[in-house]
Image (spheres, helix red, strand yellow):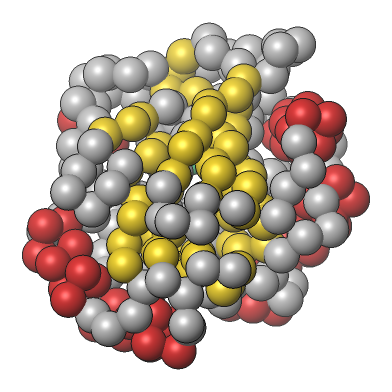
Amino acid sequence: MQRVLHITDCHLVEPGQTLLGVDTQASLEAVLAQAKAQHACDVVVASGDLVHEGSAAIYQRFLSTVRRFFDVPLLCLPGNHDVLANMHQAKLPMQALTLGSWLIAPLDSHVDNEPSAYITPDDLLDLTQAMAASDAQHLLLATHHPLVVIGAPWLDKDRILRAEELMTAIVASPGAKLRGTIFGHAHQEIEVTSEQGPLLGSPSTCFQFAPMSAKFTLDDKPPGYRWLTLAADGCITTKLERLTTHSFKPTMN
Ligand SMILES: [Fe+2]
């Protein structure tokens, strides 16, 4: 059994700054502290928008912050706010991880400075090569953008398009069998069942977006994160958590 902590959309900013009135560094630390007090953890997955406007120094702070709480394998993915070169410069770990019978693998859906998802042939090749290189039986896939319509048009327009075609290609690739997918970007809880296992979106570690909103709308819900338990037989169980002490309410001013 592997226990995964999924955090996403941390949007760290320069020291002393806030974003929509939220101290995103403090909210990330509060999330990590609450999670650490709950469970031991085998792996942390951070699915993009790790910083809001990404200098390498802020990525280094992201990495050292996670490391202060969890000294376990870490998988980082780029989101639409991320700058891939700076993530590499900060030496963020971005490689697929094999843990027991599981492969936890990223699929890069981001383009620098572009909100929409875009998966290049090379992005897909990186995934299928990681699948072929691993002897794991089960695959947990991680993307930044959702693979499904979530009912909020301003977010849905940037989702991963032609997701069925993509899933078919992944399922047909040699290697671990796809059991479920985790993603971020939507800053809200999403749980959809599919033939390829659950599609699980997690809240942001800072501010949230209102479900089913037609345009950009903030939500008052607390920062959150997700636990996943990956059983040796390929079963995924999951529990969404939110900060129990909530002092990170965003504001439009
Ligand atoms: Fe985000």
Residue sitting at x 67%, y 56%: 43
Percent across and percent down for residue 58 are: 75, 57
Say whether residue 126 is visible: no
Say whether residue 153 is visible: yes
Residue sitting at x 21%, y 69%: 171
Residue placed furthest toward the right: 68
Q: Is residue 87 above or below residue 235?
A: below
Towards the viewer: 73 or 94: 73
Quadrant containing the C terminus is top right
| Image-based side of 202 in relation to 146, left or right | right
Residue 125 sits in quarter: bottom left
Residue sitting at x 53%, y 27%: 240
Residue 234 sits in quarter: bottom left
Q: How many marks?
A: 0
Percent across and percent down for residue 216 are: 34, 24
Q: Is residue 195 above or below residue 149?
A: below
Towards the viewer: 66 or 167: 167
Residue sitting at x 69%, y 19%: 243
Residue placed furthest toward the front: 233
Percent across and percent down for residue 225 are: 59, 33
Q: Is residue 216 above or below residue 155?
A: above
Q: Is residue 112 above or below residue 147?
A: below
